């Protein structure tokens, strides 16, 4: 639907920090079409998919896992297997029932698509009026629409409406603008495996705290889960110690990235608008734009965060404590 190319960060007081990467750093997708394409690949590989079906219970015994679900909210469905993978997003009733709990911290996200090109750039608005904890964004789409959203600690829908009132007061006259909201996990589950069970993706809290994105990390974790599952079937053992290899693998790959991203996002939440404005000015005149150009990566933030920690004027904000990794 679009690309993340020309970008700029904008402070509450109007300071802009433009950045144009040599090539797009990410692609904007239609999530429904994307999911349908994945479903087609799964079917082609032999998977049987049940749509309009909600799983509500998972029982584990020596014979395997026994899933109970409702099709269309009415018709019972029972499925037996040797192992279950929970990839159910921000729905945690099954992980809680299994004693795995849920992430202990969340933000809220809200997003809408408005039928007008509000900007030619991808804009990141660093404005505590709308979100103290994170940021708001505008992303132009090829369709002529603009995707507008934000993350914050509470009442994301109301915050997004206030943001829209500021950047496009006419939005209320454009008919029924649908605002989608959802919780966004900020920390992983304390444990992402149990006997005959693995948890992956957003259900495991494998989400970038900096941006709220989880598709890429979920796909990486899915590959690691598949490796562990293959080994379990090869040995015929589905006990928790066997499946623990999945958790070791994904934490080795992602844990430091997730922890440092969360620390950076929390640091930002403590910085006031005036200081944020000064930081953007500092980056613009101190040559840090070249650093960003060389270190920025849409999916891996750790290297850039570590370099910014060394260079930005963040004294007095407990930086050493926050960035202890």
Image: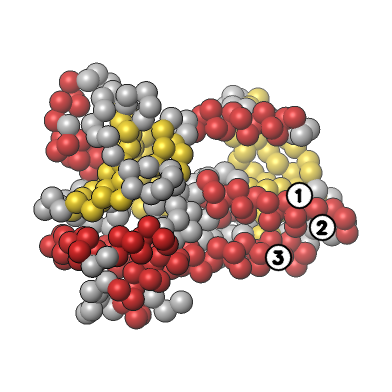
Residue 244: numbered disc: 3
Q: Secondary structure at mark 2?
A: helix
**Which residue sits at x=61%, y=30%?**
37
Give the vertical position of 210 relative to 39 (above or below): below
> Which quadrant would residue 228 be assigned to in this image?
bottom right
Residue at which label 2 appears? 231
Q: How many numbered marks, from 0 up? A: 3
**Which residue sits at x=43%, y=43%?**
24
Residue 122 % position (x, y) = 31, 41
**Which residue sits at x=28%, y=57%?**
133
Residue 195 % position (x, y) = 73, 59
Spatial CA distance of label 3 from label 1 is 14 Å
Question: Does the residue at mark 3 contact the one at mark 1 (Cβ under 8 Å)?
Answer: no
**Which residue sits at x=88%, y=59%?**
235
Residue 237 showing in the rendered view: yes
Q: Secondary structure at mark 3?
A: helix
Residue at which label 1 appears? 83
Pair 3/2: label in front: 2
Q: Earlier in the sequence, mark 3 or mark 1?
A: 1
> Which quadrant would residue 308 be assigned to in this image?
bottom left
């Amino acid at each position: 639907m679009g690309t993340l190319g020309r970008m700029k960060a904008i402070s509450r007081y109007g300071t802009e920090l433009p950045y144009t990467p040599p090539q797009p750093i990410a692609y904007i997708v239609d999530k429904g079409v994307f999911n349908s394409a994945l479903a087609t690949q799964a079917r082609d590989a032999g998977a049987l998919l049940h749509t309009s079906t909600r799983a509500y219970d998972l029982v584990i015994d020596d014979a395997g896992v026994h899933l109970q679900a409702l099709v269309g909210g009415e018709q019972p469905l029972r499925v037996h297997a040797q192992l279950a993978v929970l990839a159910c997003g921000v729905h945690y009733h099954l992980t809680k029932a299994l004693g795995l709990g849920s992430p202990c911290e969340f933000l809220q996200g809200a997003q809408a698509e408005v039928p007008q090109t509000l900007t030619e750039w991808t804009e990141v608005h660093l404005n505590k009026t709308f979100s103290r904890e994170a940021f708001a964004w505008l992303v132009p789409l090829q369709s002529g629409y603009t995707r507008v959203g934000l993350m914050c600690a509470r009442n994301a829908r109301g915050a997004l409406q206030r943001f829209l009132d500021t950047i496009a007061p006419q939005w209320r006259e454009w008919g029924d603008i649908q605002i989608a909201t959802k919780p966004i996990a900020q920390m992983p589950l304390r444990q992402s495996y149990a006997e005959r069970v693995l948890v992956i993706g957003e259900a495991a809290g494998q989400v970038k705290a900096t941006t709220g994105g989880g598709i890429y990390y979920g796909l990486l974790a899915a590959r690691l889960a598949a490796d562990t599952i293959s080994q379990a079937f090869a040995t015929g053992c589905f006990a928790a110690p066997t499946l623990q290899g999945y958790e070791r693998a994904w934490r080795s790959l992602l844990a430091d990235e997730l922890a440092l991203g969360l620390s950076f996002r929390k640091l930002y939440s403590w910085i006031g608008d005036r200081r944020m404005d000064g930081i953007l000015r500092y980056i613009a005149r101190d040559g840090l734009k070249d650093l960003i150009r060389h270190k920025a990566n849409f999916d891996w933030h750790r290297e850039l965060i570590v370099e910014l920690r060394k260079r930005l004027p963040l004294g007095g904000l407990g930086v050493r404590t926050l960035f202890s990794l």
